[in-house]
Image (cartoon, helix red, strand yellow):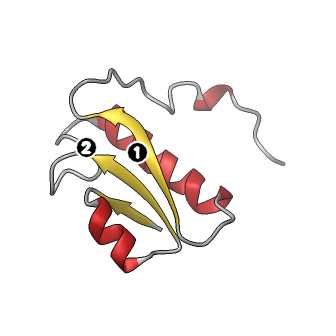
Amino acid sequence: MCLSVSREITEAVRPPRALFLRWPFGRTLGEPGAREQQLTVLLAALELATTATRPGTIVDAPWRWRRHAFVDPLANAGDAPHAS
């Protein structure tokens, strides 16, 4: 699994799966202190790691740097049923 901010490098390296973000270098998970943004990216990457079936898959993230309002993806986590 790869988080990438350079599509050209990602295509050259050919990881098994990658989430491409059009964000600045060094900000792969998001802005410092932006918990909701960082969790959203991390959860999207983990989902891709478990669902991508084609080797070499590169998924373009839908978010734009500082142009998207993020909500806490774990806000309702306490409402989910727990496995026994």
Query: In this image, 23 relative to 68: left or right?
Result: left
The vertical placement of 74 against 32, above or below, is above
Disc 1 target residue: 41
Residue at (59% x, 51% y) in the render? 47
Q: Where is residue 31 in the image (x, y as percent from the top left)?
A: 19, 40
Q: Where is residue 38 in the image (x, y as percent from the top left)?
A: 33, 42
Q: Nearer the viewer, residue 35 or 79?
A: 35
Q: Which of 60 and 2 is in front in this view?
A: 60
Dot 1 surroundings within 10 Å: few (below 14), some, or many (20 or more)?
many
Q: Where is residue 67 in the image (x, y as percent from the top left)?
A: 25, 24
Q: Where is residue 51 in the image (x, y as percent from the top left)?
A: 67, 56
The mark total stands at: 2
Amino acid type at image mark 1: Val
Q: Which of marks 2 and 1 is nearer the N terminus?
A: 2
Query: In this image, 33 relative to 58: left or right?
Result: left
The vertical placement of 8 against 5, above or below, is below
Residue 49, image quadrant: bottom right
Query: In this image, 70 relative to 33: left or right?
Result: right
Residue 68, image quadrant: top left
Residue at (76% x, 34% y) in the render? 81
Disc 2 target residue: 30
Q: Nearer the viewer, residue 33 or 44?
A: 44
The vertical placement of 31 against 24, above or below, is above
Q: Label 2, label 1: how many angstroms apart (C-alpha)? A: 8 Å
Residue at (25% x, 43% y) in the render? 30
Say what secondary structure mark 1 lies in.
helix
- Whether residues under marks 2 and 1 lie with C-beta atoms below 8 angstroms apart, the answer is yes
Dot 2 surroundings within 10 Å: few (below 14), some, or many (20 or more)?
many
Amino acid type at image mark 2: Gly
Say what secondary structure mark 2 lies in.
loop
